[in-house]
């Protein structure tokens, strides 16, 4: 005997569409929510694109030149002309270095000792001291790399001049010509790396919070109980509450892509269609998290705080800012439980490398498993709470 599902409990597409229209109208009419949905993602992209950067320019540099020769002045000129170092002040003694760094007036001090030019003239190793402000370890590490590159370039210029003189006496002199080629981000600008990550963060933040707030708002004003006693089933109610924010997520993604392309000139190297399709897969996880948050929150304030409970671990452990390879082994294993990690790898792979499903399928499979598990668990909990 076949079981007959009552008409009032069957999935009704017309009711779902009406719920979607209702949710979209409420969202558009909400003057506080609309700026969060449209304006906030663009502002976040602009702030992250300009403020959160690993590029270091115009390093405040003080110089203590105790050699006072044309050779030492040529080295100082190499630092200034590199474009990374800004000449601040010339020191006269070593005692001034501590006071200058303590006051924060310089990030680096270039100390050229006496006899610098003389050592180079007689083919001895010449010593140069670089004193860095290490209170910001990341910046100090980057500045150290810039300074080392300038010193190597200057040393290479001197060696090349010596080699040219030796060629007059030797029939043939072996040389080594090393050439560097950077793929995917030739200028090594951090904005190319940050913009795809910001897109992931915006999709997570906006859709997760808006979904949870929309459902909790219905609880607060008492309309959720009214919807429960109607013929609308829990599945229809969940779809009617989540699908509008799926559309909102795709709309925000379009806005962010336009800003990234037209403003920051960060272009998608791979398939834009694949980018949107896989973004829907990630949005299923964020919408599922939003539904779960709504089931454990009674007020919109609680929902907001609970959203940040999920947001902060995602930012820290996903590789958005901090490389996963530099984390302790225990935390590296923990990152496999963060869906944002897989979506970051997907979106940066499409954005920067232009790769497709043939290389991204492990991340896509992991993200699909997370999406199915989260949306199923949240839907069951949501239906149980309604019941």
Image: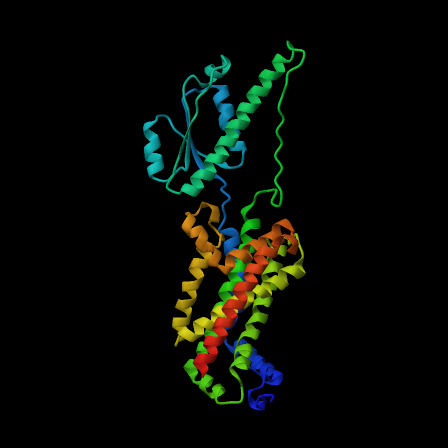
Name the residue located 40 percent from the left edge and 37 percent from the top edge.
106
Q: Quadrant of residue 357?
A: bottom right
Along the line of sight, the residue nearer the viewer: 371 or 355: 371
- Which of 138 and 378 lies nearest the eye of the viewer? 378
Q: Is residue 114 left or right of residue 122?
A: left
Where is residue 229 shown, x and y percent of the image? 48, 89
Quadrant hosting residue 131: top left
> What x and y, as percent, mark residue 75?
50, 25
Q: Quadrant of the N terminus?
A: bottom right
Residue visible at 36% across and 36% down in the picture: 101
- Between 339 and 190, the residue placed more toward the observer is 339
83 vs 218: above or below: above
Which quadrant is the C terminus positioned in?
bottom left
Q: Is residue 387 depicted above or below 183 in this figure?
A: below
Within the image, what quadrant is residue 225 found in? Answer: bottom left
The answer to whether residue 21 is seen in the rendering is yes
- Residue at horizontal 54 percent and vertical 32 percent from the top: 81
User: Is residue 169 positioned above or below 221 on the image?
Assistant: above
The answer to whether residue 63 is left or right of residue 45 is: left
Q: Nearer the viewer, residue 155 or 226?
A: 226
Q: Which residue does the image show at 44% across and 74% down from the upper left?
A: 294
Instruction: Evaluate whether residue 207 shows in this view.
Output: no
Q: Can you give x and y, in whole percent of width and height, for residue 275 in the image?
A: 63, 60
Task: Estimate the x, y position of residue 166 in percent, counting from the top left.
Answer: 61, 12
């Amino acid at each position: 005997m076949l079981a007959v599902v009552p008409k009032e409990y069957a999935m009704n597409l017309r009711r779902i569409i009406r719920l979607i229209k209702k949710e979209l109208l409420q969202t558009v009419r909400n003057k506080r929510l609309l700026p969060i949905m449209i304006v906030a993602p663009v502002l976040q992209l602009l702030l992250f694109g300009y403020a959160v950067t690993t590029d270091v320019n115009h390093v405040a540099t003080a110089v203590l030149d105790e050699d006072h020769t044309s050779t030492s002045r040529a080295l100082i000129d190499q630092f200034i002309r590199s474009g990374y170092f800004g000449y601040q002040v010339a020191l006269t003694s070593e005692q001034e270095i501590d006071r200058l760094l303590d006051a924060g007036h310089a990030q680096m001090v270039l100390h050229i000792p006496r006899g610098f030019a003389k050592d180079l003239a007689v083919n001895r190793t010449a010593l140069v001291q670089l004193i860095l402000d290490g209170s910001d370890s990341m910046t100090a590490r980057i500045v150290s790399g810039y300074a080392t590159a300038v010193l190597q370039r200057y040393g290479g210029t001197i060696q090349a001049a010596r080699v040219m003189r030796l060629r007059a006496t030797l029939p043939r002199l072996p040389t080594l010509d090393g050439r560097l080629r950077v793929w995917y981000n030739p200028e090594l600008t951090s904005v190319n790396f940050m913009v795809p990550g910001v897109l992931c963060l915006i999709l997570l933040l906006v859709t997760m919070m808006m979904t949870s707030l929309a459902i909790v708002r219905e609880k607060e004003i008492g309309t959720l109980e009214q919807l429960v006693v109607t013929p609308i089933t829990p599945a229809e109610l969940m779809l009617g509450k989540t699908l509008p924010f799926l559309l909102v997520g795709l709309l925000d993604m379009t806005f962010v892509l336009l800003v990234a392309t037209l403003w920051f000139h960060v272009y998608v190297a791979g398939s834009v269609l694949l980018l949107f399709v896989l973004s829907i897969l990630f949005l299923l996880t964020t919408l599922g998290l939003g539904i779960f948050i709504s089931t454990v929150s009674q007020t919109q304030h609680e929902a907001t705080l609970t959203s940040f409970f999920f947001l902060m671990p995602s930012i820290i452990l996903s590789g958005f800012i901090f490389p996963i390879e530099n984390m302790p082994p225990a935390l590296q294993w923990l990152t496999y439980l963060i869906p944002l990690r897989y979506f970051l790898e997907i979106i940066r792979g499409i954005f920067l490398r232009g790769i497709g499903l043939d290389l991204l399928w492990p991340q896509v499979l992991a993200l699909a498993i997370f999406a199915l598990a989260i949306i199923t668990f949240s839907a069951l909990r949501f239906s149980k709470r309604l019941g």
